Image: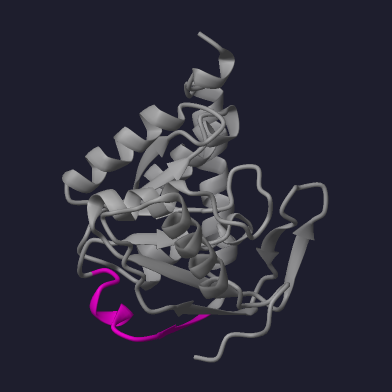
Amino acid sequence: MSSKGIEKRSKWWTRSAGHLVWALITALCSTLRFKVGYRGNAADILGKKQCIIALWHNRTFTPCFIYRYVNKGKVPMSMLTSASKDGALLATVAEDYGMRAVRGSSHRRGVAGFRDMLRELEDGCCMCITPDGPKGPIYKSHPGVIRLASVSGLPILPLCIDIPRCWRIKKAWDGFVIPKPFSRVSVLVKEPIYVPAELDDATQKEYMDKLDQALASARPDFDAVEL
């Protein structure tokens, strides 16, 4: 089997590093001031009903903390991480926040990862996905999230996270964003996107563009969100 089809398993040191990353994220996020706003009927869905949450890859520093401590939902959450060693570390972080993790991406375990996500949804979970991850191009959705919404019938909730005071990891492909301590983080949950069950290539592209447009707000890189 090609290395692209192999899931990199967690080892003791990977899990230990994941626990440490969880502690660092929690310590920093506990200093932040969060404000959450909604569009349409998103407030009636998030944390109350099953859905697929979509956010850009470089905004993934705070969502697990938001899920666990700020927006305590009744619906269990599962998170898609890559099948790489980095994904194994992030899976540990997600589990420390009480979330489940699915390993896979368009680069590794793509088909198996998609099946695993469907099983998570059938088990009653929500799914959290970065549509431009794990390797980009930045701010361009891959088709996986659209296909998942089409097959499952669940809505996509675009999550825009506005972090005006932040550090950027310049060597990362997406300029990964880390909020500075004691800064304000605004979270805007856009109105749900429902994808039809009948999905041809043109319709798939239409909904990929629609999701890109919905996520094209929040600093840095976009205009500030208005809550």
Position of 69 relative to 23 (above/below): below
Left or right, 52 with reference to 13: left
Position of 212 relative to 89 (above/below): below
Q: Point out the residue furthest to the left here.
A: 123
Q: Position of residue 164 (x, y in %)?
A: 70, 78
Depth order, front residue of 198/169: 198
Residue depicted at 64% across the width and 57% down the height: 58
Render colour scheme = one colour
Residue depicted at 46% across the width and 33% down the height: 104
Q: Point out the residue furthest to the top here.
A: 1
Depth order, front residue of 61/189: 189
Q: Is residue 81 magenta?
A: no
Q: Position of residue 124 (x, y in %)?
A: 17, 51
Left or right, 82 with reference to 154: right
Q: Is residue 170 visible?
A: yes
Q: Quadrant of residue 71?
A: bottom left
Q: Position of residue 103 (x, y in %)?
A: 43, 33
Residue depicted at 49% across the width and 18% down the height: 6
Depth order, front residue of 80/12: 80
**Magenta span of residues:** 34-47
Q: Point out the residue furthest to the bottom here.
A: 226
Residue depicted at 45% across the width and 63% down the height: 207
Q: Quadrant of residue 74?
A: bottom left
Q: Position of residue 198 (x, y in %)?
A: 28, 54
Q: Is residue 98 visible?
A: no
Position of 149 relative to 189 (above/below): above
Give the mark count.
0
